[in-house]
Image (cartoon, rainbow, N blue to C red):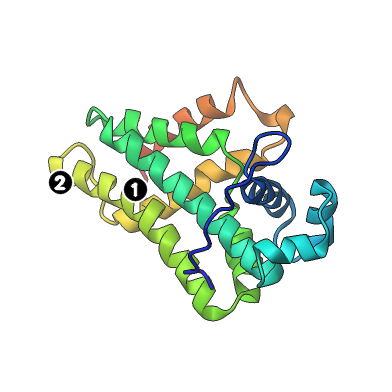
Amino acid sequence: MIDSKDEKPKELDAAGQNPKERLLDVAERLFSLKGFASVTLREIGNELSLSHASLYDHFPGGKEELFIAVTKRNILRHGEALKVRLDAANGNIQSILLSIAEWFLVQPPLDLIRMAQSDMPVLKPQDARKLMDLMHEQILLRLQDVLQEADESGTIHCANPALVAGAFVGMIESFHSMPEFAVRSSRLDMAGEMIDILLRGMDYRSL
């Protein structure tokens, strides 16, 4: 299902937007807020004034196919943005990580913990695996490569780039759920502080 090659309809709606893209936008917002299990097709249809039949015209596989399409599109969007930032990078690992953090913070949260614990288990195993592989390829592997290159250049010492890449994404994502009263200056400034701590390391000494 995840590999389906649905072509986008050529017609535009009254607002000049592709109807299928508008459907994906609304579904993405609702899935991001509530997760797969808590969103119904009826809720999505009501926001768009679409019937169940119209939704199934675009996604015959129903809510699961729609969720897969939304998640795949979101991951690919993040992956392309990271590629653009990395291609334009000046080699400074701190500025690279800050640029990546800035992108994550202006996007709806991926909410990787909920995705792994709640969303993926209800999908067909092969579809869940393909989404997680895509996440690794588009996001985690790109970060891992950046950290590996910085380690090899001697800029940082990173014994496990894969582990640090996953932890970095998780830490940046956590700023989305931080209440406003706890935000000092801005989330990006706080992410910058966290990146500085990460790069400097912690002088841990066992007592």
In this picture, residue 56 sits left or right of residue 166? right
In this picture, residue 41 sits left or right of residue 147? right
Q: Which of 19 and 192 lies nearest the eye of the viewer?
A: 19
Disc 1 target residue: 143
Residue 188 in picture, x, y percent from top left: 52, 28
Q: Which of 74 and 109 lies nearest the eye of the viewer?
A: 74
What residue is drawn where x is 65% and y is 42%? 12
Q: Is residue 174 visible?
A: yes
What residue is drawn where x is 27% and y is 35%? 87
Residue 92 in picture, x, y percent from top left: 25, 29
Disc 2 target residue: 152
Mark 1, secondary structure of its residue: helix
Q: Which of 207 and 6 lies nearest the eye of the viewer?
A: 6
What residue is drawn where x is 81% and y is 64%? 52
Q: Which of 207 and 123 lies nearest the eye of the viewer?
A: 123
Q: Quadrant of the N terminus?
A: bottom right
- Residue most extreme to the left: 153
Position above or below: 31 against 129: above
Q: CA distance from mark 1 to mark 2?
A: 14 Å
The image quarter containing residue 55 is bottom right
User: Mark 2 is on which residue type?
Assistant: Glu
Mark 2, secondary structure of its residue: helix
The image quarter containing residue 16 is top right
Closer to the chain start, of discs 1 and 2, is: 1
